[in-house]
């Protein structure tokens, strides 16, 4: 694709990706991806199954470190911090870049302990501090009113949509700058999906969000920018309204209009 | 019709019936198995009726009916427990039905349980002194006899102490003749006292007459209890039964294990499983964690997995041989040479004992634990691990705080299976320290309280011993069934408590219930 300035270097960019290649052992999953994601906006990653969206997302918080025999080339900058460097403190990176997964993953603990998990791991002991963080995070995740009376009950008893919002609250409790979401609604019913979408729209005021989605309407509704990936390559990247009304590349148009994928 | 037949087979209906029949068969066998153990185990200690039989040739025999054999729906012969081994030379007898001329259930006849020679069955003679006579009605002498026995024991203990002191004096240089004389005098005095007490105890004897008229003097001190089955109502029999159960659970065995209780064996079984668990489970869990989380799928590790999975199928005696060769003669002998030189050649750890038996059993059950832990960890969706890591947790924190709690029900299942298996294994123990009769419990009040080097008794071996190795298999049968039932109950109690705990953990930690 054309490497115009908007794409490569944003004044308000928070994540700058440059020439990112990714290999699962012999298999190359990402090819020379370069683009920047703007601060306090929602960036959607779209593309057919297996095109490398999850792989890309997991590069942003180095979750791919756990994949044996995986290799990554190129550069990812979070503000001025180079993420792809050996000496990086991965733990503190993951506190700055939170992640929400496709399948809700409430831990087998109480609602309270789920949200407090990250803080406990950090070694925070003060009860008051944790209480406060739990409440703010649950409020921000629009879950507080539903669970405030049963914080000590098992998180497993909540509904699927509540689980996902709990996972978002859990990520928020770490006070990250960026929240990565990998198809957060694909396991949810339409009502729960709507709630999450509303939540994402409010969260973007404080956080930068990168979200993978299969749902074109969803991408159109909630994202500010969109990146179309195809077979491991970035095909097109633009403001969502432009890309969805006037895609520059044929493949993008075909995908958005549902002619393939 | 042909079409019907075709559909009949195609529909799969017969197949369902075949599987149902298979299940029914298995269930019947299981129910039968438990029925035999429970019925025999529970009834083993119930007092039986004593029958008196006069044969056509004029002989008279009394005894408890043990078994009836029928032929063509008619009583063919019956087996009596006649007891009175010391009088007759046998204590069981078969009687053909066609030689019986008369049967009765005499209310006067007594069954006496004795410390030696098994039970005695007979009538109390009428010419016994009145206080003896009364004793068999009200048990009034029990107290005096117990007091006498206690005094004799105390005197013997004193004699033992003075003997020790005497021996110490004799070693002293210069020899203090005065002290030696003093101790010798004391010992002589107490020996004399013991003799007098013994003689007094000996006066408490009763004359009994067997059904066929033989006389027998019985020392009351040797009687454990006596009863007249025909005079007992259901309540009295229940009390008797409760006492027998208490004896079974809390008393030492007597008469080459054929009588008395099985306490040391039951205790040994539980202690063995306990020590086996705390020594082997941690290693099993660690190995399972490595295989489940960290190990890859290379050729070597897959071989290790196959080996571990099949280790459970190795005959248990092999583990016994290993324990005998490696633990007892390898490790044990080395430990003796290093730490117990002063007692050699008498071995301390260089012979079978509780520790080596526990470790051998631990090896035997380890694969069960390893596989359970590995599977339990694998069953947790990787998303949970990722979610924890994505929150900035280290791998160790993730393991402790998320994975292990979520895997705990599965891990506990492994523990249950391992404990159940360990409680029932006998073969490896026979090579590593189980004995028919242990002089002392492996746990007592002398330092260091838990004696891992001691030999121990075990219910499984106890059952084998009394059912196959005892001089009088027939006499040992009730205890054999009772012990078997007890073993089953112990295993069920141990596993039952773990099952309960597992269901609690499942409720608390199950990761799959949420969606
Ligand atoms: N752990 C892995 N090991 C090897 N190949 C993988 C792994 N995860 C994904 N892939 C491959 O990488 C490609 C991109 O996968 P992914 O990023 O999951 O796609 P998407 O999320 O867009 O559906 C696919 O071809 C997939 O088969
Ligand atoms: Mg994906």
Image (spheres, coloured by chain):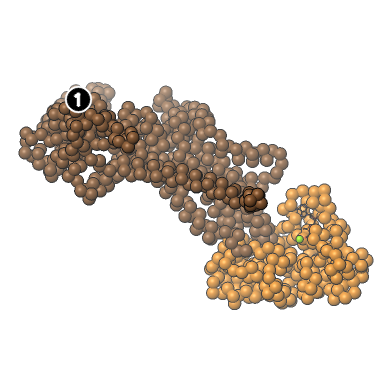
Which residue is denoted by mark 1 in the rendering? Answer: B180
For residue A200, side relative to residue B260 (left or right): right
On the question of residue B279 being in view, the answer is no
Residue B107 is drawn in which quadrant? top left
Position in image of residue B436 (x %, y %): 37, 31
Residue A30, given in percent of the width and then of the height, sits at 84, 57
Is any part of residue A181 visible from this angle?
yes
Q: Residues within 10 Å of mark 1 (few under 14, many from 20)?
A: some
Of all chains in the rendering, the one displayed in orange is A
* Chain assignment, label 1: B
Kindly identify the residue that appears in the image at 10 percent across and 34 percent down.
Answer: B125
Q: Residue furthest front?
A: B1
Nearest to the observer: residue B413 or residue B175? B413
* Residue drawn at x 80%, y 66% as measured from the top left: A45
* A45 to B188, vertically: above or below: below
To which quarter of the image does residue B180 belong?
top left
Q: Residue at x 49, y 27 (%)?
A: B329
**Ligand number 1: quarter of image:** bottom right
Question: What residue lies at 26% left-to-right and 29% top-to-bottom?
Answer: B96
Q: Would residue A131 be found to the left or right of residue B271 on screen? A: right
Q: Position of residue B291 (x, y in %)?
A: 64, 45
Task: Judge from the rendering whether residue B52 lies leftward or rightward of residue B400; answer left or right.
Answer: left
In the figure, what tint was chain B given? brown
- In the image shown, does A174 or B93 lie closer to the viewer? B93
Left or right of A210? Residue B175 is: left
Mark 1 lies on a secondary structure that is helix
Q: Is residue B57 above or below residue B404?
A: above
């Amino acid at each position: 694709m054309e490497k115009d300035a908007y794409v490569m270097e944003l004044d308000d960019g928070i994540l700058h990706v440059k020439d990112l290649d990714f290999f699962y052992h012999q298999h190359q999953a990402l090819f020379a991806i370069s683009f920047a994601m703007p601060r306090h906006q929602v960036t959607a990653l779209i593309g057919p199954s297996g095109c490398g969206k999850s792989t890309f997302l997991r590069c942003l918080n180095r979750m791919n470190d756990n994949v044996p025999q995986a290799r990554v080339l190129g550069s990812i900058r979070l503000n001025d911090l180079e993420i792809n460097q050996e000496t990086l403190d991965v733990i503190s990176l993951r506190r700055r870049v939170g992640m929400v997964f496709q399948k809700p993953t409430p831990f087998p603990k109480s609602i309270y302990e789920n949200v407090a998990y990250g803080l406990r791991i950090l070694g925070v002991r003060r009860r008051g501090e944790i209480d406060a963080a739990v409440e703010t995070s649950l409020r921000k995740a629009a879950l507080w009113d539903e669970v405030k009376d049963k914080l000590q009950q098992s998180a497993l008893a909540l509904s699927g949509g509540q689980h996902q919002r709990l996972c978002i609250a859990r990520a928020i409790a770490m006070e990250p700058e960026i929240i990565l979401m990998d198809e957060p609604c694909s396991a949810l019913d339409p009502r729960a999906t709507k709630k999450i979408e509303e939540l994402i729209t409010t969260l973007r005021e404080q956080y930068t969000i990168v979200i993978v989605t299969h749902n074109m309407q969803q991408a159109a509704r909630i994202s500010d920018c969109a990146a179309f990936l195809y077979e491991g390559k970035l095909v097109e990247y633009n403001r969502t309204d432009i890309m969805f009304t006037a895609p520059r590349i044929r493949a993008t148009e075909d995908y958005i209009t549902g002619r393939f994928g | 019709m042909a079409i019907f037949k075709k559909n009949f087979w195609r529909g799969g209906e017969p197949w369902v019936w075949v599987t149902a029949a298979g299940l029914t068969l298995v269930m019947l066998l299981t129910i039968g198995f438990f029925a035999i153990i429970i019925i025999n185990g529970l009834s083993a200690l119930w007092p039986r009726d004593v029958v008196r039989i006069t044969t056509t040739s004029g002989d008279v025999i009394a005894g408890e009916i043990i078994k009836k054999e029928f032929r063509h729906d008619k009583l063919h012969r019956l087996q009596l427990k006649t007891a009175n081994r010391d009088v007759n030379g046998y204590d069981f007898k078969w009687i053909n039905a066609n030689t019986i001329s008369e049967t009765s259930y005499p209310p006067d006849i007594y069954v006496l349980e004795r410390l030696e020679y098994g039970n005695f069955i007979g009538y109390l003679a009428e010419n016994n002194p009145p206080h003896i006579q009364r004793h068999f009605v009200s048990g009034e002498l029990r107290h005096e006899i117990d007091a006498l026995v206690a005094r004799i024991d105390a005197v013997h203990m004193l004699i033992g102490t003075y003997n020790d002191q005497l021996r110490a004096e004799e070693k002293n240089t210069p020899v203090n003749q005065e002290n030696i004389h003093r101790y010798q005098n004391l010992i002589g005095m107490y020996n004399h006292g013991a003799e007098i007490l013994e003689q007094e105890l000996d006066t408490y004897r009763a004359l009994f007459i067997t059904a066929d008229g033989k006389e027998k003097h019985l020392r009351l001190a040797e009687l454990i209890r006596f009863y007249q089955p025909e005079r007992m109502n259901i309540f009295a029999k229940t009390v008797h039964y409760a006492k027998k159960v208490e004896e079974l659970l809390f008393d030492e065995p007597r008469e080459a294990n054929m009588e008395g209780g099985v306490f040391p064996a039951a205790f040994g079984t539980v202690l063995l499983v306990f020590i086996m668990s705390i020594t082997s489970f941690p290693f099993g869990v660690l190995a399972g964690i490595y295989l489940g989380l960290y190990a890859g799928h290379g050729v070597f590790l897959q071989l290790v997995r196959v080996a571990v999975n099949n280790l459970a199928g190795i005959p248990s005696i092999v583990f016994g041989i290993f324990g005998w060769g490696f633990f007892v003669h390898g490790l044990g002998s080395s430990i003796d040479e290093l730490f117990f030189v002063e007692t050699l050649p008498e071995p301390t750890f260089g012979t079978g004992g509780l520790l080596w038996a526990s470790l051998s059993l631990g090896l035997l059950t380890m694969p069960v634990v390893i596989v359970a832990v590995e599977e339990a960890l694998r069953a947790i969706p990787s998303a949970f691990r990722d979610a924890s890591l994505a929150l900035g947790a280290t791998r160790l924190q993730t393991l402790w705080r998320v994975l292990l709690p979520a895997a705990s029900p599965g891990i506990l299942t492994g523990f249950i299976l391992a404990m159940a298996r360990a409680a029932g294994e006998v073969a490896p123990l026979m090579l590593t320290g189980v004995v028919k009769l242990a002089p002392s419990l492996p746990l007592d009040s002398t330092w260091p309280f838990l004696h891992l080097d001691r030999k121990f008794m075990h219910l499984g071996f106890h059952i084998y011993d009394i059912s196959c190795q005892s001089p009088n298999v027939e006499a040992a049968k009730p205890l054999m069934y009772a012990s078997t039932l007890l073993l089953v109950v112990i295993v069920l109690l141990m596993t039952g408590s773990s099952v309960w705990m597992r269901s609690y953990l499942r409720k608390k930690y199950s990761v799959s219930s949420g969606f």
